Image (cartoon, rainbow, N blue to C red):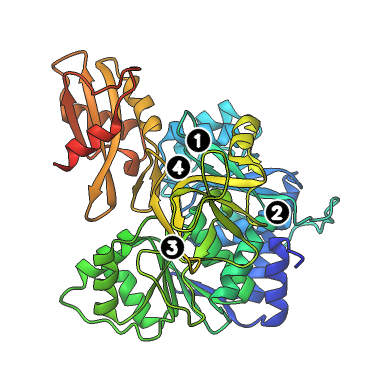
Amino acid sequence: MPFQHLDQSLRESVKRHPHALAYSFMGREVTYEQLDHDVSHVSAFFHSLGLTHGDGLALILPNSDAFVTIYHAALRLGMYCVPINPTYTIQEIFYLLQDSQVKVVVAPHQMAQLAGPLLGMMPGLHLIAVGQPEGELAHGIITYQSIFDEPSYPEFTIQQALDPEDLAVILYTSGTTGKPKGAMLTHTNLSSNADLIGDHLELTQVDHVLVVLPMFHVFCLTVCLNASIYRGAHMVILPRFSPIDTLTVMQKDRITLFAGVPTMYNFMLQAARDQTFDLTAIRYCLSGGAAMPEAVQRGFEQKFGVVILEGYGLSEASPVTCFAPVDGRPRKIGSIGLTLPMVEQKIVDLQDEEVPVGSVGELVVRGPNVMKGYWHRDEETNITLRNGWLHTGDLAKVDEDGYFYIVDRKKDMIIVGGFNVYPREVEEVLFLHPAIQEAAVVGVRDDNYGESVVACIVRKDASLTEQAIMDYCHEHLAKYKCPTKVVLYDELPKNTTGKVMRRILREQMQV
């Protein structure tokens, strides 16, 4: 099957049903024809700035119509996009901007204070502010609204043909050893996965897809945005997640497809205990990003009369490799489902040899959805993509019917509300504190977020308090990465080689 450039998916949906709704956002309804016009307008504006094929654009935006338009405008010009969580700290954002070598940054107007430091660090950068500024913006910042004040921009012809193998998106995933690394996803990677999801769920233009997962997250980018546009579905965009607001929209707008992480399902279940919502329009509820607790799954399904389908994926695979079946085959609670068409999965041992059915080993994946590699990280690319397979680092098993089960996650990774937190990244911040001697970070079970971050600390200065450590983390880390608890130790447990034994710390936390 020939895979498409993502811009081609949009153009074909415009041809098939130009007057169908592409999205609704904050009371504004936009057809596919209008979306295509907006995308062309912004793309022409980017070209007028001198941006061209192969340039990078950072999207530091919450869910919005601007995200959808700018994302596709950049892709139409042959640029690559770097979605960034807008709740990241300034230090985290600066690192990603420098590493990804972007030439334009799009961010909410509230982040305008970054303009001075950014321009000093990256001269020639174009800055675009989205939203209504409360006062005068710094010199050199372009407002998103002003782009549309001009009726048109000079027509242009792209000098280099758009190729499905072009780089489309760099998604940063925190490394277990050091700084975040960018997974390079091509148009083939992303469009093949969007095609598979759209076909698997039988999306059509009559579907209403609720977009409340963060757009900068690969789960939302593929399942809610790319797959919807590929199939010409209607995206109902919410700027943020609120349990009751989300349920209200699901009922009012007759949502047919909802995708969320287990934390969302848990919050909605808890918030709506004494309320009734009509969710009969829903065809599928999808869950990913973390393991779904069986009690939450059964409770939500009984309360709302829906079925939740679990899947599995990772950024390096664009992301989905496995999904619960919808073709009449049984759903197995606790399983991540069956391998998607055109994707291959197997379980291997330490020598990369396939293990027998039912045996535990590492889950490896290959297919058109697997990333090109890590941005400027050849050594880490060769480690992760070896022998023709993407090594996920996740321990899993497969049963005799081909259903896969995750047995354990990457050794030390913590998943907070669907977001990955790697202990080493938090520990590096903690070790910079002058009064901290040792630090180890572990995850513990959390009824609301799946897991929470706990920092185990040995102090140099006995006057340093737990609260002071948490305050320090909030200054240097995104909120979801910050410890919710600090435990003070005289000495951390170590093995004979001096390595901290996280397993013992985790066991102590569960007592």
Query: In this rendering, does residue 449 appear at all?
Result: yes
Asked if the residues shown at circle 3 and circle 1 are in contact, with their CB atoms under 8 angstroms apart, the answer is no
Q: CA–CA distance between discs 4 and 3? A: 39 Å
Which three-letter amino acid code belongs to the residue tagged 4? Met
- Judging by the rendered image, the residue that carries numbered circle 1 is 180
Which three-letter amino acid code belongs to the residue tagged 1? Pro
Q: Position of residue 50 (x, y in %)?
A: 75, 44
Q: Which mark is residue 45?
A: 2
Q: Nearer the viewer, residue 273 or 85?
A: 273
Q: Nearer the viewer, residue 435 or 333?
A: 333
Q: Earlier in the sequence, mark 4 or mark 3?
A: 4
- Judging by the rendered image, the residue that carries numbered circle 3 is 336
Query: In this rendering, does residue 66 appear at all?
Result: no
The structure residue drawn at horizontal position 41% and vertical position 54%, both measured from the top left corner, is 406
Q: Which mark is residue 111?
A: 4
User: Quick check: 375 above or below 466?
Assistant: below
Total number of numbered discs in the rendering: 4
Q: Earlier in the sequence, mark 3 or mark 1?
A: 1
Q: Position of residue 324 (x, y in %)?
A: 46, 70
Asked if the residues shown at circle 4 and circle 3 are in contact, with their CB atoms under 8 angstroms apart, the answer is no
Q: Earlier in the sequence, mark 1 or mark 4?
A: 4
